[in-house]
Each structure stands twice: as C-alpha cells, then as structure tokens.
Amino acid sequence: MNYLTVFLNLFTLTMQGMMHLIFIGRLTGKTLKYRYFAAYLFLLNLMELIFSAFLVPAILAIGAELLMLYTIHRFLSKNHPMISLTASVLALYITQLSFGMMNAIEVIILPYFLGKTPLLFLLIFLSAILTCVLCFCCYNLLVKNLSLNEEDAPYIELLLFPVLFFFIIELYILQTAYSIVPVHIMDSFTHTGKQLLLLVMQALGLAALFCTQYAWQRTCKSFQTQAALASLTQAAQAQKTYIAEAQMRDEQTRAFRHDIRNHLSVLHGLLNTENLEAAQSYLQKLENISSSLSFPCPTGNPTIDILLGEKLERAKNCGISTDISLLLPANDVVDDFDLCIIFSNALDNAINACLSLDSERPFIHILGEQQGDFYRLEFTNTCSADPLPPMGIGLKNIQAAALKYHGAMQIEKKEQCFCLHVLLNIR
C-alpha cells in the first residue's frame, strides 16, 4: 500500500504540474521552455516528500505551490503581476476542485470495497486517473473561452477576487469535510447525503466559475468598447474641426485670388506714381496675407494641409526635425475623414514617442506615394529602446481605416527607430 501511495502521489503531482504550466501558458499566450517544466516538476515532487516527512499542513503546501507557480510565470514568462496571480490561482483551484469532486464520489462508494484489497487499489488508481481527466477537461474548457493578456490587466481584479473566493471555499471544504471518518458510519444515510451535498456544492462552484469568467469577459469588452467609442468620438470631433478650418482657409484663399487683380492694379498705380514707400508697404501686406494662407507641406487637400500644419508646428516647437515626401492619391478615392484618422493618430504617436526619448536628434519622416492600385504611407520616428507596448486605440483606429480600403497596417521597431506602414487599396 505504501508503494502504491508513493506511486500515485508521484503520478498525480507530475500530471497536475504539467497541466498547470501548459494551462497558464495557453491562458496567457506565453509558453515556457522544457527545462522550466523539468525544474518545476522536480521541485513539486521534492516539496511533497519534504512536507509529508515533516507533516506540514496541506494548506501550507498549497500556498507554497501557489507561490512557486506565481514566481515562474511572473519572472520567467514576464507576465503582468496580477495576471500571473490570477492564472496561478485558477490553475490550483481547478486542481483542488477536481480532487474534491472525485474524493466525494470515492468516499460514497468506498464502503462497498472495504475488505477487498485488489478492488480497493483499483478504485484508488481509477480515482487518480479520473481526477486528472476532470482537471484536463476543465482546463481545456477554460482556455477555449478565456485568455489573459496585457490589455486585460486594468480589469483583472474583477476576475481575481471571485476566483480567490472560490479557491478559499474549496480549500475550506477539503480541510474540514474530508477528515478521517469512522468505518461504522461510512455507509450510513447521513454520511452519504453529506458527501452528495459536497459533490453538488463543488459542481455548483465549477459552474459559478464559468459564469464568472463569462461575465468578466463581457464586462471587459464593454469597458474596451466604451473606451474605443470615446476615442472615436473625440477623433471625429477633431476631424470635424480640421474640415471646418480647411473649408474656411479655402474660402479665404478663393477670396484672395478673386481680389488679386485689384491688389495688383493698386500696386501698379503706386509704382507709376513713383510712390515707392507706399508700394513697398502695400507689397508687404500682400506677402503677409499670402504667407498666412500657405501651408508648410501643401498636398492639394485642404483638410490634410490644415492637419499637417498643426502637427508639424507642434513638432517644430518641441525641437523635432521633420522630413516629408507626400503625394496624396488623386480623384479623392480616400475619404478625408479616413485620411485624418491615419495622419492624426500616426503623428500624435510619433510626437509623443519623440518626447519620451532623451535624444538630441528626434525626427519624424513621412512618406506617401501611389504604387499602382495601392497607396502606401510610411511614418518613421525615433523612440525608446523598450519593447513595444500593446496596440493602443490610435493604432487600432488606423488599422480599422486601412481595413476599410481592403488594406493593411504593419508596425516594426529596430533599436530606437519605430516605423508604421499603412497600405490602402485605391482601385
């Protein structure tokens, strides 16, 4: 019996340890190297042997296992702290829940196997197998319907605290309900009813976990949708402002062109009368009006000219050098609103990236050209050497605008240089 117990413990711990790491890796999208698997399984079994030899309470053993899982996925997989903790608690909760449910079934049918040693060994071994199978099925179902990534970090506490509650309740059940039961009451009606009630309670706990997971996902999507809607509303308001300013500038330009002949006639008269001082003053006024109507990077599109003028002026004031080679597609095949979304978000991100870098030569390069049936935009800027953060609302808006034209968006980073590529199908 002792050899069987040792074998079953090693088998169960090894299977559960492997499922722990695989489950958390799939849940967070970050897999571990094989040597980390081997190290974790070795430490898990070593810890079991030591704790069993010194009769350490099971609650402390589970706490040590939780700490070990958290450490591995926090510092080796580089997961967010709260995501690592939530995934580790989920992994251990499913393990303990599977053990508790099978333990309840095992205790109910155990009286029928007392005195039948071979069948009793078979029951214990089958229970260990079914525990692993139930654990695997729960893990697989969770992974299919749940994923934890950096975008979910602001809302992870909404999932962590319910899971912690379920986990603590399960530990309490295991510590208080599955103590040593006298043989003479194991087959009593009261004892069987208690075990059935525990089985139902734990099954309901599992159902509550999946309901909580579903509700949390819907809540996260709701928060993200609200944030995206607020950002799009702000962007839309900004685009309306740019369009209104562009229309106003266009009207002012037309008025200036309409009056230019009169201005030239007045200037011609002043020169004919040799009133050079008045002619020079009048000419200076004409130059000032002309300068106020010009754009730093004229594209032929009043809306984009206004936008570029505002963004490039901000970049200049921040000490950021700019280099622009931009030719917009002809025939207005791309809506001004979509162009504003692409340019405003790309330039805002580029300026902010330059400002966050302590560099003596921050720069922004813009390239826009038509290539056959496609229009290609490229935004290049200096940035920090840190890894790229998760895609924000601005890049998602650019991606949505590109997909609207059956195009694509791609980002790449090389050392301290970030490049955003946008391709639009303009057929």
Image (cartoon, helix red, strand yellow):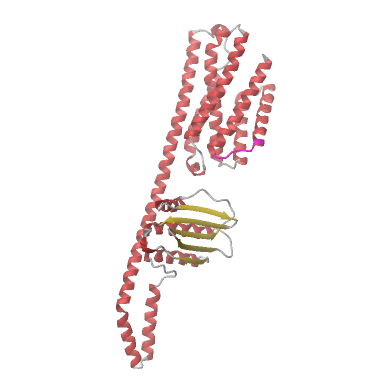
Give the left or right position of residue 3, taking residue 114 as reference: right
Q: Residue furthest front?
A: 372
Give the left or right position of residue 305, taking residue 77 as reference: left
Which residue sits at x=62%, y=40%? Answer: 76
Foreground residue among 50 and 46: 46
Q: Is residue 30 magenta?
A: yes
The quadrant of the picture occupied by the C terminus is: bottom left
What are the residue bounds of the magenta stretch?
29-34
Which residue sits at x=52%, y=8%? Answer: 187
Counting every numbered tag in the picture gives 0
Query: Where in the figure is residue 299, as x and y percent of width and height?
Result: 41, 67
Query: Where in the figure is residue 169, as x and y percent of width and height?
Result: 51, 25
Q: Is residue 226 magenta?
A: no
Q: Is residue 22 above or below residue 121?
A: below
Q: Is residue 208 above or below residue 111?
A: below
Which residue sits at x=38%, y=83%? Answer: 283
Q: Which quadrant of the view contains residue 26?
A: top right
Foreground residue among 196 and 286: 286
